[in-house]
Image (cartoon, rainbow, N blue to C red):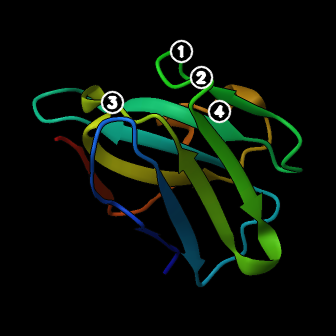
Amino acid sequence: QLQLVESGGGLVQPGGSLTLSCAAAEFELDGRIIAWFRQAPGEAREGVSCISISGTYTNYARSVKGRFTMSREDDKKTVYLQMNNLKPEDTAVYYCAATSRGSWRYCNYDGMETWGTGTLVTVSS
């Protein structure tokens, strides 16, 4: 069964940093577009970032651009989300997701095929 497992969440003060990891189990990440999403309490799940199959291209939600950086290491079957200058509004459960559909237009909620179970990030003083 295809699985993605997120880790690295926790409690951090405003202005702090965290790095989330997303590891693939039972399948390879290469050939797949990977994305991070987040869901705050009472809110809809929203896209945070996407990374292309080659890792050359990334895109970010306007709310995190300049603060978050997504990267991938396919040989380690792991994707990362480096989060800097965290704000209380970044508090959410963060999910990674993958799709084998190669087009960038599938970098959205409906385009994803495999999801992780999430890791909680809390930004609070």
In the rendered structure, which disc, 3 or 2, sits on the residue that comes first in sequence?
2
In the rendered structure, which disc, 3 or 1, sits on the residue that comes first in sequence?
1
Q: Are marks 4 and 2 in contact (CB under 8 Å)?
A: no
Q: Look at label 2 and name its amino acid.
A: Lys
Residue 106 shows which numbered tag? Answer: 4
Q: Which residue is drawn at 53% across and 65% down?
A: 21
- Report the mark closest to the observer, 4 or 2: 2
Q: Residues within 10 Å of mark 3 (few under 14, many from 20)?
A: some
Residue 72 x/y as whole percent: 74, 59
Q: Which quadrant is the C terminus positioned in?
A: top left
- Could you tell me which secondary element the residue under label 2 belongs to? loop
In the rendered structure, which disc, 4 or 3, sits on the residue that comes first in sequence?
3
Give the labeled residue for mark 2.
65
- Could you tell me which secondary element the residue under label 1 belongs to? loop
- Report the mark closest to the observer, 4 or 3: 3
Q: Look at label 1 and name its amino acid.
A: Arg
Q: Give above or below for 119 relative to 56.
A: below
> What is the spatial separation of the Cα atoms under label 3 and label 2, in whole angstroms?
13 Å
In the rendered structure, which disc, 4 or 1, sits on the residue that comes first in sequence?
1
Q: Do the residues labelled 4 and 1 touch (CB within 8 Å)?
A: no
Q: Which residue is drawn at 27% across and 44% down?
A: 13
- Report the mark closest to the observer, 3 or 2: 3
- Could you tell me which secondary element the residue under label 4 belongs to? helix
Looking at the image, which is closer to me, 89 or 59? 89
Give the labeled residue for mark 3.
87
Residue 123 x/y as whole percent: 25, 42
Give the labeled residue for mark 1.
62
Q: Look at label 4 and name its amino acid.
A: Tyr
Looking at the image, which is closer to me, 81 or 59? 81
> What is the spatial separation of the Cα atoms under label 4 and label 1, in whole angstroms?
18 Å
Q: In the rendered view, does 94 fall on the left or right side of 10?
A: right
> What is the spatial separation of the Cα atoms under label 4 and label 2, in whole angstroms?
20 Å
